[in-house]
Amino acid sequence: MSEWLENHLPKVVLAPSFIAVLIFVYGFIGWTAWVSLTRSKLLPKYEIHGFIQYERLFDSPRWDTAINNLYLFGALFIVIAMVLGLLLAILLDQKIRVEGAIRTIYLYPMALSMIVTGTAWKWILNPGLGIESMVQGWGFPNFEFDWLVNPDYAIYTIVLAAIWQSSGFVMALFLAGLRSVDGEIIKAAQVDGIPTWRIYTAIIIPSMAPIFLSAFIVLAHLAIKSFDLVIALTGGGPGYATDLPATYMYAMAFSRGDIGQAASSAMIMMLVVFAIVVPYLYSELRAKND
Amino acid sequence: MTDLSMPQAQTRSQSATGKIALRWLLYVLLGLFALYYLMPLFVMLTTSLKSLEEIRTGSLISLPREVSFDAWKTAWSGACTGIQCEGLRPYFWNSVLIAVPAVFLSTLIGALNGYVVAQWRFKGANIIFSLMLFGCFIPFQVVLLPMARLLGMMGIAGTIPGLIFVHVIYGLGFTTLFFRNYYVTIPSELTKAARVDGAGFLRIFWSIFMPLSLPIIVVTVIWQFTQIWNDFLFGVSFSQAGTQPVTVALNNIVNSTTGVKEYNVDMAAAIIAGLPTLLVYVVAGKYFIRGLTAGSVKG
């Protein structure tokens, strides 16, 4: 008996976690998928009615706004955070004397809750008391900066705050990448008299392709899951102008009592993450096993 | 000799001035970016120390004329989250009560899992690991509804043990990943030699692997603590009045519509809610960054 246990202990130790993952990840995904095919409203029903929830979802102007916001927010957030992160990494890679301190400053927002970040930016962007009134006080009485309460521009304030929060992290990723480029090649290029900017664009940056991919995956993943920041900064408003899929799902699940819509919108989010992460994980795991 | 070296020295000093100017430009740019990142923290701090009167009349970035800690006191023990006016204090302790056991349990289980997957491979272990790894990436919205029902069935809906449970379950993927990636770098000959000497599974774990694990334990604890402390989605979905974590209470304070809007209290509350993770970052930033990059960069 004790010998059996000793031989099987590794499996016994791993089993509870494995079962937990099977139930709480895969089982729950299955439950949500099932319910997304029913007519569930306030309470879940288990009778399948085809894709009516998805039809309702795609007919809903609010979901339409949420998806369009995700495209706009995701594209701007990913591109700007990557460009800014790369720029900062290159600037910091020039043998800066106080590099450690600067890096600490650039990266600290990542340690903060998005709710804290959102609260701070909500205050800074407040038209009556924040940047707008500050610049007006400097003698520009016609200066306007009301993006936070303007339905057409509020989504850009979320982009702004999200970039502030995450660009330092992208910088850290790129900095690690820059440091891992073979120093001999760079020295050889310098000896040949190739200008520094050419060394970066032709040698260093192309060799960092895997880091670009990692950064893209992480940022895309953050963008799809964005929830806290929207809640804290705009609450999805004005109206539902800054809704994202995550806030749509939450509103349907917990304030509108529409479980069918909540489940189907969660499944769409899941599929988007799938489409981005699975090929990445697959190639990573295969590369490791080879 | 001197004839030849004169112009050469001149160009050299010219390019040296260029270099110095470029260096200056570099430092100015880096400094400006540092200001950009520090600005919100600075604004939060100065606003929290101003009176409401000064906030209305003064400028966003001006220093407080009179430093007052009243807003901090209110934020800690008097601010209203909806109808209750007890400040952040009870919710701050809720977060501590959630984070401490959840961090401990998820780290311990992750260490054991990682040890098995890295050192005691059996048939199917890699598939199990891949399945767990994928669990790290799902958008949690997809498990919110069934989890709410399950917590209700287990009788721990809206309780702190319920939130601990949720955080442990969905933290396991990452903690296992961290320890697995750390333990694969330890040569398996070590385990084999210990087994020849008669040490068993747990003995090897406690006496050989645990003493080697301090760095990865620090990375994992910091990662989990930051994740759980900063969590909002689970907190807002699975808590009720009285068991909310600090992030949810902060959001309620900021968005409560009763009475005069006290921006200085909002800012003080935001700093209080952010202080524990900020402190961890300042003290152990190196490990925090290692955790951040471990999930996205190989190795």
Image (cartoon, rainbow, N blue to C red):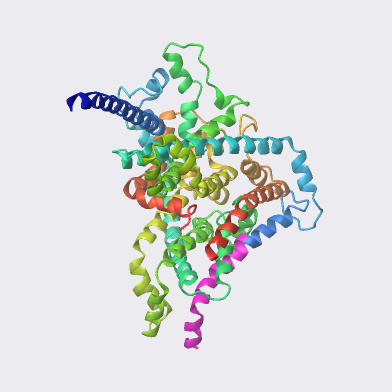
User: What are the residue bounds of the magenta stretch?
Assistant: A1-25
**Whether residue B138 can be seen here:** no
Q: Indicate the position of residue A251 as horizontal and vertical percent values.
A: 64, 42
Percent x, y of residue B216? 39, 60
Does residue A104 lie above or below A210 as drawn?
A: above
Residue sitting nearer the eye, B198 or A40? B198
- Tell me: B276 left or right of A270: left
Residue that appears at 38% across and 45% down: A188
Q: Quadrant of residue B16?
A: top left
Query: Does A10 appear in magenta?
Result: yes
**Would you identify the image quadrant in which residue A65 lies?**
top right
- Looking at the picture, how far across and down is residue B214, in whole percent? 34, 62
Q: Residue at x 44, y 34 (%)?
A: A197
Q: Position of residue A89 (x, y in %)?
A: 42, 40
Question: Does the magenta segment cover residue B238?
Answer: no
Split into 4 quadrants, where in the image is the C terminus of chain B?
bottom left
